[in-house]
Amino acid sequence: MTVFSAESGHEQVVFCHDKPTGLRAIIALYSTALGPGLGGTRFYPYASEADAVHDALELSRSMAYKNALAGLDHGGGKGVIWGDPDKDKTEPLLRAYGRFVQSLGGRYYTACDVGTYVQDMDVVSRETRFVTGRSEVNGGAGDSSVLTAYGVYQGMRAAAEHRWGTTSLRGRAVGVAGLGKVGKHLTRHLLDDGATVVATDVSERALEWARTHHPEVTLVADAEALIREPIDVYAPCALGGALDDDTVPALRAAVVAGAANNQLAHPGVEKLLAERGVLYVPDYVVNSGGVIQVADEIHGFNFERAKLRASGIFETTRQILRLADAEGVPPAVAADRLAERRMADVGRLRSILLP
Amino acid sequence: MTVFSAESGHEQVVFCHDKPTGLRAIIALYSTALGPGLGGTRFYPYASEADAVHDALELSRSMAYKNALAGLDHGGGKGVIWGDPDKDKTEPLLRAYGRFVQSLGGRYYTACDVGTYVQDMDVVSRETRFVTGRSEVNGGAGDSSVLTAYGVYQGMRAAAEHRWGTTSLRGRAVGVAGLGKVGKHLTRHLLDDGATVVATDVSERALEWARTHHPEVTLVADAEALIREPIDVYAPCALGGALDDDTVPALRAAVVAGAANNQLAHPGVEKLLAERGVLYVPDYVVNSGGVIQVADEIHGFNFERAKLRASGIFETTRQILRLADAEGVPPAVAADRLAERRMADVGRLRSILLP
């Protein structure tokens, strides 16, 4: 993996090393055309430096597109810390990381991701002001699953309108794979809207939650069983890679819209979905509620303002699905085009010199 | 080549990419313990990204040691631009590079190196204030060969004292390999001091200069011939790698002190020199006059102040040679220890919080 490959096109990739604390971090900025890069920090025991670089490049690129479509004044950025969070995460290491984030002078804002939590961002914030996703007692917005689920629900409504001519999910069967925090909130929105929910989770505790609070939810053994249910909408809300060469042919849903990141196991699956007539709303279009929340926190968190912006996911999804039809491409391609258009059109405005 | 290897220990390595201008640059900061990294930008058509990374890491490490021993408040940094300066060097590319230098907020100061010139730094300075080595009309210090040669001469004097008990080079035969700008100035210092000079250069123009201005200089065919001359001091002032497994055994000089960078062709040559009883003063100890000059320029260039600091190369060399004797190690090892000591001792002072 090289940084300067023709495909990557990242603006800046910063390797940060602090021997005494053992910090080895890579901060990748895909583009700052729309504003400072914004994206979480993943703390993960990669097998190699090349793997860590690869992940930083991929994730920061995704954030660029997600942030652009979320209408944020943020470019795409992502940090990865190469290490085992259970063993290597210490106050000095997190603070050393914070100093490196600060050294970029605000070109990158960090937040939580796999392996990092609001408490960690509180520690990072003791060395840099360019951090968001802190705990509520420290001025942070707190749990972002509320707005993430809300955004997914908005995207799903737009997809329903596109497919069935009505934004309501009343009477539709929705399969929710993963009853984590986002899956739970999403389930509530769907039930409130009059949909029926079929769900699954690997955790017995999550299933217990459903049995106790929502006995009307049908529980099935696993995701494999879920996709074979007679559902109208499939909402992957757990790990990535839910859509692959095995699951897509078995899928009975007409619409896919969920919160999980990287739902397509590999490039080309979006074509498979299109061929089967499945309307797939790209994950990064509908799951941007979380980043909308942490972006709002930078200006002093206001839940209503953030929720209003997350409501915009409905209109953005609508626009993408129309563009996909108009240009005869899958929604994933249309979404990329829309994101690239915004990066170019809004980014260009800096050429107008301000006094 | 990986960035996070155990050997490297660099603090920060920044990949900068600007597709429209074709800029692909790597800025490596070895350490900022003593202050902002300072080192030139090399513009070179590397065969691969790995080669470019390797060069950036090596050069920035060297600059850390050079700057530490020069007594500067600067850590080690270096930039490399991957490209062919003859074909790829444009105003937009240099200015894009300048913006990336500016993006580091002063943690790195750039200057000239192989493939970049004062005129290029003038262009870079239109995007960043963290650049030195500009042209005189733009507030720069101009040609740094004067102080580089002066510093080499000071280091040579200290070596002479160590070897022969007198700082004067009167009556000594000095072999100057390379009559570029630095070699010419050095030749003048040596002749003024009463030394005899034997010299060589690949350029007929340089030889003509010697014949015209200093007919007392003996000219020989090439460096191979030069080292076989009955010289007391050998001063490599051209390309790197002058000292290798072939040249060291043939060397007749008792002292080596010159301006060329990376005189040792590979690690281990310093031991070979020690075994043959040759007193080798490490290149980066004596050739720091140039970086002393550009460091001074940052504060508004004052030639006398910069010259005074370059005079310090005499005392530093003396200290290194004594330390080498005291600790029973080659001067190169002693120099590294002294540099590391200063980085640790002065760097530690930041732990004293200032109001």
Image: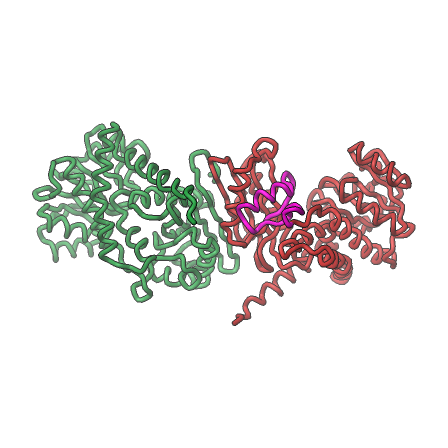
Chain colours: A green, B red
| Quadrant in the picture for residue B308 | bottom right
Instruction: Report the predominant secondary structure element of the magenta stretch.
Output: loop
| Quadrant in the picture for residue A135 | bottom left
In the rendered structure, the answer to whether residue B154 lies left or right of residue A228 reads right
Residue B7 placement (x, y as % from top left):
58, 50
User: How many callouts does the rendering have?
Assistant: 0
Residue B349 placement (x, y as % from top left):
58, 67
- Foreground residue, A336 or A194? A336
Residue B169 placement (x, y as % from top left):
87, 52
- Foreground residue, B91 or A156? B91
Magenta residues? B110-139
The structure residue drawn at horizontal position 76% and vertical position 44%, both measured from the top left corner, is B182
Could one spot residue A44 in this view of the protein?
Answer: yes
> Which quadrant of the figure contains the N terminus of chain B?
top right
In the rendered structure, the answer to whether residue B146 lies left or right of residue A40 reads right
Residue B76 placement (x, y as % from top left):
61, 53
In the rendered structure, the answer to whether residue B195 lies left or right of residue A299 reads right
Determine the residue located farthest toward the front in the rendered image.
A355
In the rendered structure, the answer to whether residue B252 lies left or right of residue A270 reads right
> Does residue B270 sit above or below B51 in this rendering?
below
